[in-house]
Amino acid sequence: MQRALSVPKLEQLSHQLRRQILGTIYQTKVGHLAGSLSSLEILVSLYFGGILRYDPRRPNWPERDRLIVSAGHLAPAIYTVLAAAKFFPKRQLQRFGLLRSRFETHTVKRVPGIEYSAGLLGQGLSVAIGLALALQNNRSRIFCLMSDGEQQEGQVWEAAMAASKYRLGNLVGIIDANQIQIDGHIRDIMPLANLKLKYEAFGWRVFETDGNDFRRLVPAFSQALESRHQPAVIIAKTVAAAGIPSMENNPYWHSHIPNSQEYQQALKDLRQGL
Amino acid sequence: MKGSTRDGFGRALCQLMAENERIVAITADLRTSTRIGACPQRFPDRFFEVGVAEQNLAGIAAGLALGGKTVFATSFACFSPAINWAQIRQSICYNNLNVKIVGSHAGLATGPDGATHQALEDIALTTVLPKMTVVAPADSEQAATLTRLLAQKPGPAYLRLTRPKTLELDSFRFNIAWKPLRLGRPQQLNKGTGLTIVGFGPILPEFLHIMPPQKWQRADIFNVHTLKPFNPAPILASLKRHPQIIVVEDHQRQGGLGSLLSQAIAKAGLKVKWQHLAVNDQFGHSARNFRALWRRYIFANLKLV
């Protein structure tokens, strides 16, 4: 497990990784940009903020914490973070999404550090619950990263009921609430109403926080991990395509690949920092 | 002796859970109907109940398997693998996890619950999934044996079970001694000349029961208890000796044993006289007596020369 980095170091790291994610997607012409950038601080907090217990030399270490990435399209972000955490060399991501590369465009278990192969939304929370039940007598904590659009899937609420019934204090859900989905803004496509009240009504402890700010995010994780008998969820309010003002909050960038001009503009934006 | 395939499964699973601590059971409000009602008392830490939520059933089962368990997830075939097919496809098969989907009340055999509850598509839905093993026992004894064999084989599987008490295979006087059951090997029940009879599930013994004995006693009879991996070799060898076949199944005509076998026959370049007794692209109906449903929807098409 890595030592927790200071907030300035975390910010510096996520700035570097943001550039790498943008480069990978631009060069390979596959992948989902907006979510990968909005969820980046969540992933960096987990792996470098002293939250997740892991060992890149032993990706199958039985006592490790498990991160189930339910929103499999966040692959460019999680792969980039795993490379930074030394699960595999960074240069391997040059072949992201390409035929005969092990890096599927949606997260896949054959990549060291990935626990579960995903892609279809709404399925990961149930899997995380099964893991939390199987590992109840183990030190491991189970984290499940979802998107906010994903909350529209009915299975998520079947799972929310079950986590509460089984009093899963070893489970922490995280919602990357970036307010967009493929066809537009969530408020227009299918509003989620009050997610905080919904999860509370389902028996969860809920923590709302700014999901791109390490100063708020890292403490939210620590608080979420305090309960022994109740699942917790962090609603991380993020910005779609965070860090690139020319792309931020625009549903177009959920799955579009920047052309050369847009890429150059994005790099310029990035240089100015978050 | 008579029993149901769900009885055989429930009996075997309880024994297996007593022998092996890694085996867990999970259900979606159908513990009694899937014959694992004794599990919560006997194994409280290894029994999970998700309520009427089959997508979550498949997902939690996947997570339990990811945590090292051998998972039996029970429901009715019309719910699981039907409502939760995408969860079985991704969370279980794509992730290659050790989950056995147990779908009871398959086929017209379900009887009184009627068309909505008579799963006639489950073999099609499951055989099409990579990594999947698909098994359908013909009687209660065989259900127990196949449950045991599935527990020993890591990876995703579908076990098709049925509701009513039906004829056991050993109530017939077959003319050969059977080899021990092995997953993936059709079980030859009888040797003959002139006709091949092929089927799976309890409809096979029940079909033999309504046939004139002199007809089936002179037939090669195969019980295809494993539909995936499907091994047609012994059936093709039989057809080379006498190219006449009756395929019987309590399933839609498309996507079941008839489909699998006709591909194999075409590939082998055989010309055979073919009769396929199956449900003909229609929904079932409620009835007090499931045998009446079989007569009307399946056996009615039988032509004996």
Image (cartoon, coloured by chain):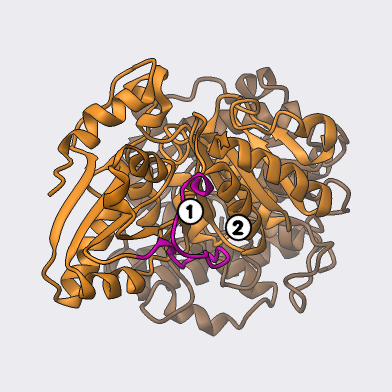
Chain colours: A brown, B orange
Q: Position of residue A210 (x, y in %)?
A: 64, 39
| Nearest the eye: A218 or B170 | B170
Q: Position of residue B133 (x, y in %)?
A: 48, 59
Q: Is residue B187 highlighted in magenta?
A: yes
Q: Main secondary structure of the magenta part?
A: loop
User: Label 1 lies in what chain?
Assistant: B
- Point out the residue furthest to the front here: B214
| Nearest the eye: A2 or A219 | A2
Mark number for residue B135?
A: 1
Q: Magenta residues, as a range?
A: B169-191
- Spatial distance from mark 2 to mark 1, Cα to Cα? 9 Å
Q: Position of residue A242 (x, y in %)?
A: 50, 51
Q: Position of residue A107 (x, y in %)?
A: 51, 62
Q: Amino acid at mark 1?
A: Val
Q: Is residue A55 left or right of residue B258?
A: right
Q: Amino acid at mark 2?
A: Leu
Q: Residue at x 61, y 35 (%)?
A: B7
The residue tagged 2 is B150
Q: Residue at x 58, y 37 (%)?
A: B1
Q: Is residue A259 above or below residue B82?
A: below
Residue A36 showing in the rendered view: no
Q: Residue at x 78, y 41 (%)?
A: B46
Q: Residue at x 34, y 29 (%)?
A: A189
Give the crowd class for mark 2: few <14, some 14-19, many >=20 residues within 10 Å: many
Q: Is residue B117 above or below residue A270?
A: above
User: Label 2 lies in what chain?
Assistant: B
Mark number for residue B218?
A: none
Quick one: SS at disc 2? Answer: helix
Q: Is residue A182 left or right of residue A271?
A: left
The mark nearer the N terminus, 2 or 1, is: 1
